[in-house]
Amino acid sequence: MHLDVRELREFYYRSKLGRAVQRSVRDQLLRIWPEARRQTVVGYGFSVPLLRPYLKDARRVTALMPGPQGVMPWPAGEKNVSVLCDDTRWPLEPASVDKLIVFHGLDTTDHAAALLEEAYRVVAENGRAVFVVPNRASLWSRKHGTPFSVSRPYTLTELERRLKWHGFLVCNHVTALYQPPRSTKFWLRIGPTLERIGQSIPLWFGGGVLMVEVRKQVPRPQRPGLGQILAKPMGVLDGIGQAEPARRTPSQ
């Protein structure tokens, strides 16, 4: 289930805890991608907290926001680069993206397989993508009051297996967000120290989010149905042989 863009904006831009999250995840992303000079950078979901460092030097920056989430103009006071789009049909040419960031996207969609098909379609042959999802082993995925507690968490093994099945090769994986999901002054003050210490912790005991960098596998692996996946929502009873109810026309 997608989060509401107003709630995400409130958390990331108007709360101290949200700004701490933004800093932690963005710092890790910049360690993976320190620059994007003359490249096309696209974010999907609510990626705008991570896109700002690339605005200056990238050839083009676009923030895709899914319809169920809603869209907001961004960046504030500058030419808008945010676009409202369908979950599984992005207004981008094939192989047109050098760097793709998916944040509050894969873990919130009901169409994960179709979303990954779109990601594979738009990333250039020499491009890269980073998928950021809640870590199932962390407090952040269980503590109510943050965006990570109302989306689908992953383990690293589960996330990498899913990405590989859709034709991506894993290049790197890191974790971020080692401070606890608490907004008291004490935890916010020592948050940066905890982030530094966290980098020495084994990955399976890692932080609140998993970050996996991938590239396209070319030629693509041949698997039954790959590339022909429909935007069919996942259900808790999928795969047990029950009849599927008639589909309704999605509300606008």
Image: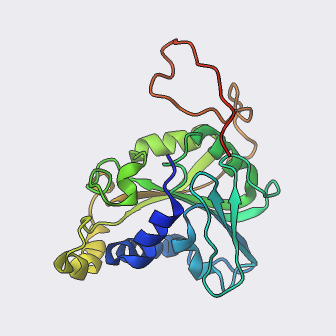
Asked if residue 25 shows in the view, the reply is no
Q: How many marks?
A: 0
> In front: 251, or 123?
251
> In front: 69, or 197?
69
**What is the x, y in percent for residue 212?**
50, 56
Q: Residue furthest left?
A: 186
Q: Quadrant of residue 200 in the image?
A: bottom left
Residue 81 appears left or right of 234: right
In the image, is residue 30 above or below residue 252?
A: below
In the image, is residue 48 above or below residue 250?
A: below
Residue at image position (73%, 48%) is 89
In the image, is residue 165 above or below residue 207?
A: above
**What is the x, y in percent for residue 248?**
66, 29
Q: Residue furthest right?
A: 93
In the image, is residue 252 above or below residue 197?
A: above
Residue at image position (42%, 61%) is 174
Q: How is the image coloured?
A: rainbow
Residue 33 appears left or right of 187: right
Residue 6 appears left or right of 249: left
Asked if residue 36 shows in the view, the reply is yes
**What is the x, y in percent for residue 110?**
55, 40
Residue at image position (60%, 49%) is 169
Q: Residue furthest front?
A: 251
**What is the x, y in percent for residue 66?**
63, 55
Residue at image position (67%, 51%) is 119
